[in-house]
Amino acid sequence: MKHLVAPSILAANYANLQADFEMLNASDADWVHVDIMDGRFVPNISFGMSIVKVMKELSQLPLDVHLMIVEPEKYIEQFRDAGAEVITVHYEACPHLHRTLQQIKATGAKAGVALNPHTPVWMLENVLEELDLVCLMSVNPGFGGQKFIYNTLPKVRQLKKMIIERNLNTLIEIDGGVGLQNAEKLLQAGANVLVAGSSVFKSANPSETIQRMKRIGRDTLMV
Ligand code: DX5
Ligand code: ZN
């Protein structure tokens, strides 16, 4: 399967979100990654469902909503109503993960679980069958523009092995510090979805960066 590119809107220009969404709509991007931070699970606050609703109106691409919040089960239906296509909760924030995943799926959204850098992939052993997506955090969640943690690569390989052994189609998403410099390695290790914030929005030509990221592995000569 061809990999997906999901630019992270956290790094966009909030004074003119419309312009950034127009760029994304016309680009090779597959999803828009939307980071929700509550100032409790992570030491930063981003925005809530009313802004996601605005993003849904501006976006022609599916919204991939990453909930970096405590008690995510309280807000799943609201984020789905606001327009989330994929809803990802954190393993570390869900004492009843299995139940929370059923709750996400009951809304019709795709269900994802994110793992912090210190959480081993085998923690998902008994819940993998329930998942549409696993998001491996390659930075400590809370901020854009951080340095990629290289220990993510063996985690991608381990998780890929678990998915293949069980004959599943679970997508592996990588979030944090992803750019043209490490995308190929991640894809070779088994990643399916690349989230990219700063590397896209802080580049001279965001749409071209997305295109180059999308072409990696397909036609390396054009990269
Ligand atoms: C970090 C967020 C990421 C962030 C990635 O907590 O989950 O999605 O936007 O940003 P970059 O690509 O700049 O590391
Ligand atoms: Zn994210």
Image (cartoon, helix red, strand yellow):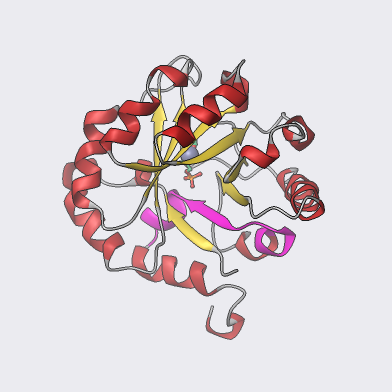
| Number of callouts | 0
The residue at the far front in this view is 106
Q: Was residue 187 drawn as part of the magenta stretch in this picture?
A: yes
Q: With 148 as the anchor, is 145 left or right in this view?
A: left
Q: Residue 174: give x, y in percent of width and height.
A: 59, 48
User: Would residue 47 be seen by someone viewing this image from the given angle?
Assistant: no
Relative to 50, is 222 above or below? below
Q: Which residues are magenta?
A: 186-203
Q: Was residue 131 drawn as part of the magenta stretch in this picture?
A: no
User: Would residue 175 be seen by someone viewing this image from the given angle?
Assistant: yes
Residue situated in front as seen by the camera: 93 or 111: 111
Relative to 98, is 164 above or below? below
| The C terminus: image quadrant | bottom right
Q: With 126 as the anchor, is 86 left or right in this view?
A: left
Residue at 54% across / 40% down in the picture? 146
Residue at 60% across / 37% down in the picture? 139
Residue at 22% across / 37% down in the picture? 53
Residue situated in front as seen by the camera: 167 or 70: 167
Q: Residue 147: give x, y in percent of width and height.
A: 59, 43
Residue situated in front as seen by the camera: 199 or 27: 27
